[in-house]
Image: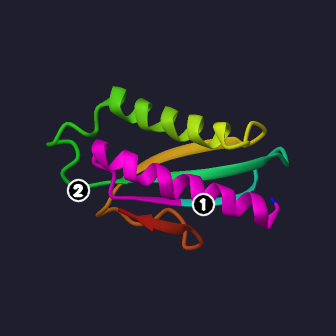
Amino acid sequence: MRERDRRKVREVLEQLLAELRAYGVVALEWRTGEDWAGDPAVWVWVVLPADAEARGLWDMKKLEAISGRIREALQESGGEDLFIYTYFRLVDEPRARADLEVLAA
């Protein structure tokens, strides 16, 4: 993925993070690259508070809404050809990868 495209992904995620705070999102962790088929991709880990389940944030409909909003925002910004992979974790769980960029709320 070109550096220009990578910067655009970062800009979109930064703007989106403010919106996702309403869903209780603590941070977004992300990276870009090529997926298993060699297609341009972005991987986004949505970080929720440790008490997400108790607060009703670990609800499947809410998680689907967050995932859908991420996909929509990235595709609207010109990333129609991007494959977007979204994952969720709690803030007290270890980060999935050491090479992720972090955008904190």
Q: For mark 2, give the secondary structure.
A: loop
Residue 44 relative to residue 39: left or right: left
Q: Amino acid at mark 2?
A: Ala
Query: Camera-side residue: 95 or 9?
Result: 9
Could you tell me which residue is drawn at 74 percent across and 36 percent down? 80
Farthest residue toward the right? 38
Q: Which residue is mark 2?
A: 50
Q: Which mark is residue 10?
A: 1
Q: Amino acid at mark 1?
A: Arg
Could you tell me which residue is drawn at 75 percent across and 57 percent down? 5
Q: Is residue 6 magenta?
A: yes
Circle 1: is it few (<14), some (14-19), or many (20+) Cα within 10 Å?
some
Residue 51 relative to residue 12: left or right: left
Q: Nearer the viewer, mark 1 or mark 2?
A: 1
The residues colored magenta run 2-29
Could you tell me which residue is drawn at 78 percent across and 39 percent down? 81
